[in-house]
Amino acid sequence: MDNRRLIIDSAKELFWHHGYSTTSPKQVMVDAGVGQGSFYHHFPAKADLGQEVVRENGRDLLASVRSAMEGLPTGRQRLAAFLGSAGDALGGCQIGGFAYDAGILAEPALRETLGTAFVELAGLLEQVVREGQDDGSVSPKLDPAKTAAALLAVVEGAFVVARATGRQSYADAATAGALALLEATS
Amino acid sequence: MDNRRLIIDSAKELFWHHGYSTTSPKQVMVDAGVGQGSFYHHFPAKADLGQEVVRENGRDLLASVRSAMEGLPTGRQRLAAFLGSAGDALGGCQIGGFAYDAGILAEPALRETLGTAFVELAGLLEQVVREGQDDGSVSPKLDPAKTAAALLAVVEGAFVVARATGRQSYADAATAGALALLEATS
DNA sequence: GTCTATATTTAGATAGAC
DNA sequence: GTCTATCTAAATATAGAC
């Protein structure tokens, strides 16, 4: 495999679990097993690597949510599958941590890419809420965009609370509570 | 006012809005208007200051939530007031960002203090859910702990999504969606 | 594309005078 | 308690040979 890909793959994991600002180029080089010359040849600045990582992690997350929903018969079941995204919350959300990273927020290009990932995810969820209303599994009284935003926030917040307390059980309680609210309305 | 307090007050704002790991002691000194000698006299290590900041920001957040709820007649109204905590989400949650900060998570004492703040907040919300069930404003079918965890996660997630997209409207949509779910069950 | 050597700036302090 | 001087390591690169 080429070094560029090795660097990106290492950085995706490191920036995800350890943060962008708090992970140095050197840590990425060591993890990827490439030298400094190679690293700076492919990525003249750290932000160039950050851009690729934010884009790919966003794309990967969207793909894994779609994959988790695939084949489920009702909209509500697909939303429940999305809530299951917080099933391993202690490692943090693939992109959620970037929202609190000063190094990401200070770079307009990175911030834009991050925002796009969240907007796409929110759009997907809104569509699934509508599908659930069409198939009768989600209450027609709910506003699709607001309900989608609430469910996305529950999952992102579940990651935050689980990491802050060190307890996965807080994430599980949050998503179970949200699912119960969704089910109680239908 | 004494320098120790000036340092803590500056650090509370800076760590809140800009992150703990991404704010240097020097930035704090300059903002507080104190010299290096004074800074390191009061806080031999940055983590000592971090400990005070996490504790105070957690305490302040709990106090402001209690204050926002004060005087409201029903549990559901008090929960709605809590959801309003994300009304100015672009600056980030006073403690939520610490959950993704490698420098906080690497220090057991800081992590413990952070976890305690979230556990106390969750406990308060659970109590208010129970009060709402007692006064008839919240459905008795809901599990208090799980519902509280879901509401806490919605607010924390609203901060994350608002900051990631740069749009307050995403936070507002999330909390409105959550409130609608809560109201639809009662 | 990759290597090693070098450079600049900052983080995070420590030492000792006042 | 505060000041200034000093220090070490790391972050983030750049330069030029191979």
Image: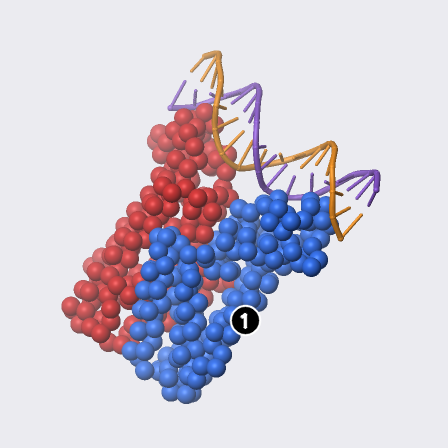
Chain colours: A blue, B red, C orange, D purple
Decide: is B135 above or below A97: below
Asked whether the viewer can see residue B57, the reply is no
| Horizontal side of residue B101 vs B67, given as left or right | right
Residue, far bottom: A135
| Horizontal side of residue A123 vs B43, given as left or right | right
Across and down, in percent, residue B110 comes to 38, 43
Tell how many labels. Answer: 1
Across and down, in percent, residue A180 comes to 31, 73
Q: Going 51% across and 60% down the picture, which residue do you hit?
A: A95
Decide: is B116 above or below A185: above
Q: Going 51% across and 74% down the picture, which residue do you hit?
A: A67
Crowd rating for badge 1 (residues with CA inside 10 Å; few <14, some 14–19, many 20+)? few
Asked whether the viewer can see residue B58, the reply is yes
Q: Going 32% across and 78% down the picture, which residue do you hit?
A: A183
Across and down, in percent, residue B150 comes to 33, 65
Residue, far left: B134
The amino acid type, in three-letter code, at marker 1 is Ala
As helix, strand or loop, the secondary structure at mark 1 comes to helix
Across and down, in percent, residue D13 comes to 69, 43
Q: Going 27% across and 76% down the picture, which residue do you hit?
A: B185
Where does label 1 land, which residue?
A63
Q: Nearer the viewer, residue B81 or D13?
A: D13
The image quadrant where one finds the C terminus of chain B is: bottom left
Kindly identify which chain the residue marked by label 1 belongs to: A
Looking at the rendering, which quadrant does residue B182 occupy? bottom left
The image quadrant where one finds the N terminus of chain B is: top left
Looking at the rendering, which quadrant does residue B14 occupy? top left
